[in-house]
Amino acid sequence: MTTAADRSVLRRASLGTAALILVASALVLLALGVALLITGLLASLHPHNVAAAWARTLAGAGLLGSSGGIAALAWLAFESMAQRQRVMNRKLKFAAVIGSLLALVCLPFAAAIGAMSRVSWFG
């Protein structure tokens, strides 16, 4: 084999490893996001601590967005590993950006609401 072929095999192996790691992290974030979203929505039915329910719901939505973005990046890595260029690349990049933006918007608000719900307002 030549060095160009060695680089190609190494590139495919590294892209495959990165894609598998991205898929595993996307699945973990998806499970956490669904759990937080469900607990946040169920906690909002009983208005005991509305701020904590909002924090859980926003954190769940943010984690779902980040898992969608990571899954789109994993799919792009799988496609580039197979060395196929498609029109879907633009759509996958768009999904990755939207998922990342959803995470960047929801997760800081969830953290702020969660932190402020534990602080004494008049103390």
Image: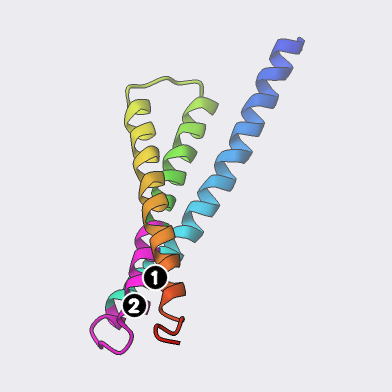
Looking at the figure, which quarter contains the N terminus? top right
Q: Is residue 75 above or below residue 8?
A: below
Classed neighbour count for the residue bearing mark 2: other residues with Cα under 10 Å, few (<14), some (14–19), many (≥20): many
Q: Secondary structure at mark 2?
A: helix
Q: Is residue 74 covered in magenta?
A: no
- Using the rendered view, name the quadrant where residue 13 is placed: top right
What residue is at 43 percent from the left and 51 percent from the top? 66
Q: What residue is shown with label 2?
A: 51
Classed neighbour count for the residue bearing mark 1: other residues with Cα under 10 Å, few (<14), some (14–19), many (≥20): some
Q: Secondary structure at mark 1?
A: helix
In this orientation, which residue lies closer to the viewer: 59 or 113? 113
Disc number for residue 90: none
Q: What residue is shown with label 1?
A: 113
Amino acid type assigned to the residue bearing label 1 in the image:
Ile
Q: Is residue 101 above or below residue 47?
A: above
Looking at the figure, which quarter contains the C terminus? bottom left
Marks 1,2: beta carbons within 8 A = yes
Which colour assignment does the render follow? Answer: rainbow
Does residue 24 appear to the left or right of 69 in the view shown? right
In this orientation, which residue lies closer to the viewer: 37 or 89? 37
Q: Where does the image place residue 102, in percent across and percent down from the top left?
A: 35, 50
Q: Which residues are magenta?
A: 42-62
What residue is at 39 percent from the left and 48 percent from the top? 68
Does residue 3 appear to the left or right of 114 in the view shown? right
Residue at the outermost left position: 45
Q: Where does the image place residue 78, in percent across and percent down from the top left?
A: 50, 33
